[in-house]
Image (cartoon, rainbow, N blue to C red):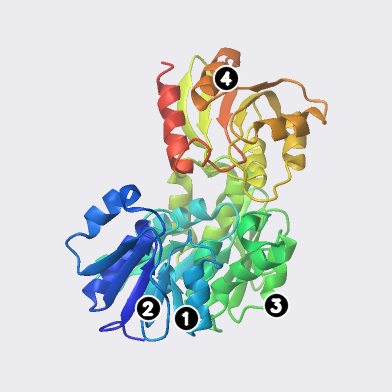
Amino acid sequence: MTVRDRKVLVIGMGKSGLAAAKVLAAAGAEVVVSDAKVKEELTAALQELKDWPVETVTGGYPEIKPGRFDLLVTSPGVPVWAPPLVQASTHGIPIWSEIELAYRFARGPMVAVTGTNGKTTTTALIGQMFRDAGYAASVAGNIGTPLIQEVAQQAGEHLFVVEVSSFQLEWVDRFHPRVAVLTNLTPDHLERHGTMENYLATKARIFRRQNREDYTVLNYDDPEIRELARQTQGQVIFFSSSHTLEKGVFANKGNICIGQEGNLIPVCAAQELTMPGRHNLENAMAAVAVGWAMGLTAAQMADTLRSFPGVPHRLERVAFIKGVEYINDSKGTNPESAIKALDAFQKPIILIAGGSRKGDVDFGAFAEKIQEKVRELILVGHTAPEIKETVLKTGFCRVRVVHNLEEAVKTAAGLAKPGEIVLLSPACASFDFFRNFEHRGEVFKKLVHSLV
């Protein structure tokens, strides 16, 4: 479908919706942009669109009926049961996510990364590998810049490395990455997907359009991800931090290695990675698998692996104050991610956790890990009482509940001793006090720096 002279409804005035509306308008579509929020809540978005030839609808959505619209482009935050999506489906009107729209405009191959945890770090690392090797490569998608915005800015042949969420995969059709990566899968966003089966099926849409000329990179250590090898038409490359593989990327005698037809190609020593934690070893292996599939040499990949510092809000080192290290892991928005953060360190930990609930989350394993790794626990946010109750059942009693993040940081600073770590890894979403996890992380960093 070409979009010139087509009537397109863009749902949502967030970053991706605004970017999609501008590209569609520039391509000659008749664009209506709508949002359920009232006008007063959308001042910045409406200001951004004021010079564009688009119609805006606030406080709801226009009626969806045959002949009114030829296409809907929806934003990640809009659930599949939202009335305009249901109405469009009923009338047979195509619905695209923003990444589907971007794919149709893109000039160049895509590497797409999804998974419950690790996708942001893996995406950023892959992008850096290709840039360091001299490729024209951009990182976009769920990681920050909307993919459609990045695609519109690149005129020539380009490689797009894209972080993709399950929400963005709900409405893809022709989306077809050259390399698709699934890092891992644990319960998350079940308030949206309902069941783990639905969540897995949505993630698997990332490789639905692949063929034998493409590659699917899968985590061998995750049984559900491993089974997806039966479903993809792409060439499967496994990575594993705990198994030796005949073909794939794995650890051998402390080195990240590529196994290929009986040959073992060392890339670099695992201890040379600047990012701490076993989960970051897995992220590095996934990135190596992509580089290998796309023709990078072991030496090229090793150069980046030895220098890549990680990404903000993922085990980000904030400050070293009076012998205490402060770590920002605000991206730890579910228990499994927070568990990996705790496992990344051997020093005693003062943990700040808690926030808003994400669906039907079980804090049991998180509580057990706290009992094993944490010296003092400071809880904040709506989930604090629930986490406290779960942790107390393990026999761990060094728990404090505070009113806000500022109080949490001050309390942690008062408890921490030289040689210890103060770690923010909430295991929860951020929407009780903050706009998003980035906002929470920035506030944490500001509070830490104010201690000096």
Q: Residue 249 in the image: state x and y as whole percent.
A: 62, 62
Amino acid at pointer 4: Ala
The tag on residue 52 is none
| Residue 375 visible in image | yes
Looking at the image, is mark 1 or mark 3 earlier in the sequence? 1
Looking at the image, is mark 4 or mark 3 earlier in the sequence? 3
Looking at the image, is mark 3 or mark 2 earlier in the sequence? 2
Q: Which residue is mark 2?
A: 104
Q: CA distance from mark 4 to mark 3?
A: 48 Å
Q: Residue 348 in the image: state x and y as whole percent.
A: 66, 24
Residue at 28% from the left image edge and 73% from the top image edge: 31
241, 409: nearer the viewer? 409
Residue projecting furthest to the left: 51
Q: Secondary structure at mark 3?
A: helix
Q: Residue 100 in the image: state x and y as whole percent.
A: 43, 74
Q: Residues within 10 Å of mark 2 (few under 14, many from 20)?
A: some
Q: Residue 69 in the image: state x and y as whole percent.
A: 37, 80
112 relative to 365 in the view: left or right = left
Q: Which residue is mark 1?
A: 174
The tag on residue 412 is 4
Looking at the image, is mark 1 or mark 4 earlier in the sequence? 1
Q: Residues within 10 Å of mark 3 (few under 14, many from 20)?
A: few
Q: CA distance from mark 4 to mark 2?
A: 49 Å
Looking at the image, is mark 4 or mark 2 earlier in the sequence? 2
Locate residue 103: give its quadrant. Answer: bottom left
Q: CA distance from mark 1 to mark 3?
A: 20 Å
191 relative to 147 in the view: left or right = right
Q: Residues within 10 Å of mark 1 (few under 14, many from 20)?
A: some
175 lies above or below 345:
below
Q: Which residue is mark 3?
A: 230
